Image (cartoon, rainbow, N blue to C red):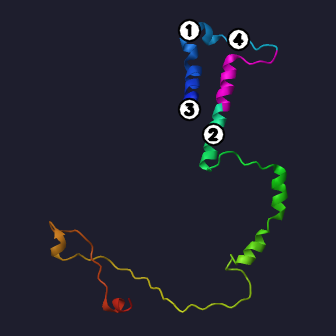
Amino acid sequence: MHLTQVLIYLSFMVAFGPVGLGDQTAHHQPPATDDGEQCSTCEVRQQIKNMRLHAIKSQILSKLRLKQAPNISRDVVKQLLPKAPPLQQLLDQYDVLGDDNKDGLMEEDDEHAITETIMTMATEPESIVQVDRKPKCCLFSFSSKIQVNR
Protein backbone atom coordinates (compact mmCIF):
# COMPACT_ATOMS: atom_id res chain seq x y z
CA MET A 1 0.00 0.00 0.00
CA HIS A 2 1.46 3.38 -0.95
CA LEU A 3 2.14 6.06 1.61
CA THR A 4 -0.51 8.38 0.19
CA GLN A 5 -3.13 5.63 0.36
CA VAL A 6 -2.25 5.01 4.00
CA LEU A 7 -2.53 8.73 4.75
CA ILE A 8 -5.92 8.96 3.08
CA TYR A 9 -7.15 5.84 4.89
CA LEU A 10 -6.00 7.15 8.27
CA SER A 11 -7.55 10.56 7.57
CA PHE A 12 -10.89 8.93 6.84
CA MET A 13 -10.63 6.81 9.99
CA VAL A 14 -9.98 9.86 12.14
CA ALA A 15 -12.62 12.00 10.44
CA PHE A 16 -15.43 9.44 10.20
CA GLY A 17 -14.59 7.16 13.12
CA PRO A 18 -16.76 8.90 15.76
CA VAL A 19 -19.74 9.12 13.35
CA GLY A 20 -20.12 5.37 13.10
CA LEU A 21 -19.85 4.79 16.84
CA GLY A 22 -22.76 7.02 17.80
CA ASP A 23 -23.05 9.93 20.22
CA GLN A 24 -21.54 8.06 23.16
CA THR A 25 -17.98 8.06 21.91
CA ALA A 26 -18.21 11.27 19.91
CA HIS A 27 -18.34 13.40 23.06
CA HIS A 28 -16.41 11.11 25.39
CA GLN A 29 -12.63 11.16 25.43
CA PRO A 30 -10.80 8.72 27.64
CA PRO A 31 -8.70 10.40 30.32
CA ALA A 32 -4.95 10.42 29.93
CA THR A 33 -3.22 7.77 31.98
CA ASP A 34 -0.78 8.56 34.73
CA ASP A 35 2.08 6.97 32.78
CA GLY A 36 2.03 9.87 30.30
CA GLU A 37 0.48 7.76 27.53
CA GLN A 38 -1.75 9.49 25.00
CA CYS A 39 -5.29 8.59 24.11
CA SER A 40 -5.83 6.59 20.94
CA THR A 41 -7.04 9.67 18.99
CA CYS A 42 -3.91 11.61 19.95
CA GLU A 43 -1.71 8.69 18.93
CA VAL A 44 -3.41 8.49 15.53
CA ARG A 45 -2.98 12.24 15.04
CA GLN A 46 0.69 11.99 15.95
CA GLN A 47 1.17 9.10 13.53
CA ILE A 48 -0.55 11.06 10.75
CA LYS A 49 1.65 14.07 11.51
CA ASN A 50 4.79 11.92 11.37
CA MET A 51 3.68 10.28 8.12
CA ARG A 52 2.94 13.69 6.59
CA LEU A 53 6.40 14.95 7.54
CA HIS A 54 7.95 11.81 6.08
CA ALA A 55 5.98 12.29 2.84
CA ILE A 56 7.11 15.94 2.57
CA LYS A 57 10.74 14.95 3.16
CA SER A 58 10.44 12.22 0.51
CA GLN A 59 9.00 14.68 -2.02
CA ILE A 60 11.84 17.15 -1.40
CA LEU A 61 14.45 14.42 -1.80
CA SER A 62 12.84 13.14 -5.00
CA LYS A 63 12.69 16.64 -6.49
CA LEU A 64 16.37 17.07 -5.65
CA ARG A 65 16.97 13.60 -7.13
CA LEU A 66 18.54 12.33 -3.92
CA LYS A 67 18.00 8.92 -2.38
CA GLN A 68 18.67 10.14 1.14
CA ALA A 69 19.29 13.41 2.93
CA PRO A 70 22.89 14.63 2.77
CA ASN A 71 24.89 13.86 5.92
CA ILE A 72 26.41 17.23 6.78
CA SER A 73 26.82 18.39 10.36
CA ARG A 74 26.85 22.03 11.44
CA ASP A 75 30.51 21.71 12.36
CA VAL A 76 31.42 20.81 8.78
CA VAL A 77 29.44 23.78 7.46
CA LYS A 78 31.16 26.16 9.89
CA GLN A 79 34.55 24.82 8.82
CA LEU A 80 33.80 25.25 5.12
CA LEU A 81 32.28 28.73 5.22
CA PRO A 82 35.33 30.68 6.42
CA LYS A 83 37.40 29.10 3.64
CA ALA A 84 35.09 30.45 0.93
CA PRO A 85 36.70 33.37 -0.98
CA PRO A 86 35.29 36.81 -0.20
CA LEU A 87 32.69 38.18 -2.54
CA GLN A 88 34.64 41.33 -3.44
CA GLN A 89 37.64 39.26 -4.50
CA LEU A 90 35.44 37.23 -6.86
CA LEU A 91 33.88 40.38 -8.29
CA ASP A 92 37.31 41.91 -8.89
CA GLN A 93 38.70 38.71 -10.37
CA TYR A 94 35.93 38.24 -12.91
CA ASP A 95 35.23 41.98 -13.41
CA VAL A 96 31.52 41.56 -12.81
CA LEU A 97 30.94 45.24 -12.13
CA GLY A 98 31.63 47.12 -15.34
CA ASP A 99 30.63 50.52 -13.96
CA ASP A 100 33.23 50.78 -11.21
CA ASN A 101 35.55 53.79 -10.81
CA LYS A 102 38.72 52.07 -11.97
CA ASP A 103 41.00 54.04 -14.27
CA GLY A 104 41.03 52.18 -17.51
CA LEU A 105 40.78 52.74 -21.19
CA MET A 106 37.35 53.66 -22.34
CA GLU A 107 36.36 51.72 -25.39
CA GLU A 108 34.74 53.86 -28.04
CA ASP A 109 31.74 52.62 -29.93
CA ASP A 110 32.00 52.56 -33.67
CA GLU A 111 28.28 53.01 -33.96
CA HIS A 112 26.49 56.15 -32.91
CA ALA A 113 22.80 56.70 -33.25
CA ILE A 114 20.68 59.80 -33.15
CA THR A 115 17.17 59.23 -32.03
CA GLU A 116 14.18 61.22 -33.16
CA THR A 117 10.61 61.31 -31.96
CA ILE A 118 8.06 61.45 -34.71
CA MET A 119 4.41 61.99 -33.96
CA THR A 120 1.94 61.29 -36.68
CA MET A 121 -1.78 60.77 -36.94
CA ALA A 122 -3.46 58.06 -38.93
CA THR A 123 -5.30 59.13 -42.06
CA GLU A 124 -8.33 57.54 -43.62
CA PRO A 125 -7.26 54.80 -46.05
CA GLU A 126 -8.46 54.46 -49.59
CA SER A 127 -11.89 53.05 -50.28
CA ILE A 128 -10.37 49.74 -51.44
CA VAL A 129 -9.61 48.72 -47.84
CA GLN A 130 -12.90 49.95 -46.42
CA VAL A 131 -15.89 47.75 -45.59
CA ASP A 132 -19.30 49.44 -45.54
CA ARG A 133 -17.51 52.80 -45.74
CA LYS A 134 -15.64 51.98 -42.53
CA PRO A 135 -11.87 51.50 -42.59
CA LYS A 136 -10.46 48.09 -41.59
CA CYS A 137 -7.01 49.51 -40.93
CA CYS A 138 -5.12 52.71 -40.19
CA LEU A 139 -2.84 54.45 -42.66
CA PHE A 140 0.26 56.33 -41.55
CA SER A 141 1.92 58.50 -44.18
CA PHE A 142 5.54 59.60 -43.79
CA SER A 143 7.12 62.39 -45.80
CA SER A 144 10.08 61.68 -48.05
CA LYS A 145 12.37 63.62 -45.67
CA ILE A 146 11.64 61.16 -42.87
CA GLN A 147 11.90 58.12 -45.13
CA VAL A 148 15.37 59.11 -46.39
CA ASN A 149 16.77 58.98 -42.88
CA ARG A 150 15.50 55.45 -42.39
Task: Give the Cα distance between marks 1 and 4.
Answer: 16 Å
Q: Is mark 2 on a helix, strand or loop?
A: helix
Mark 4 against mark 3, which lies toward the viewer?
3
On the image, numbered disc 1 is attached to which residue?
22
Residue at 74%, 77% (x, y): give it: 93
Q: Give the range drawn in magenta.
A: 35-50
Picture coordinates of residue 46, whole percent (x, y): 69, 26
Amino acid on which the number 1 mark rests in the picture: Gly
Residue at 81 percent across and 49 percent down: it is: 73
Disc 3 and disc 2 in contact, CB within 8 angstroms: no
Vertical relation: 133 (above or below) 37: below
> Judging from the image, what secondary structure is the residue with disc 4 in?
loop
Indicate the secondary structure of the residue bearing disc 3. loop
Q: Marks 2 and 4, Cα distance to the nearest angstrom?
A: 32 Å
Residue 142 x, y percent position in the rendering: 31, 85
Residue 99 quadrant: bottom right
Q: Where is residue 92 in the image (x, y as percent from the top left)?
A: 75, 77
Report the Cα–Cα distance between label 4 and label 3. Answer: 32 Å
Indicate which disc residue 30 carries: 4
The amino acid sitting under disc 3 is: His
Camera-nearest label, 3 or 2 = 3
Q: Is residue 34 magenta?
A: no
Vertical order, 106 against 133 (above or below): below
Query: Do callouts 1 and 4 mark residues in contact (Cβ within 8 Å)?
Result: no
Of the residues under marks 4 and 3, which one precedes in the sequence?
A: 3
- Residue denoted by label 3: 2
Horizontal side, residue 100 vs residue 60: left or right: right
Which label is found at residue 56? 2
Q: Which of marks 1 and 2 is nearer the N terminus?
A: 1
**Three-letter amino acid code of the residue under disc 2:** Ile
In front: 89, or 59? Answer: 59
Residue at the spot x=63%, y=90% of the render? Answer: 107
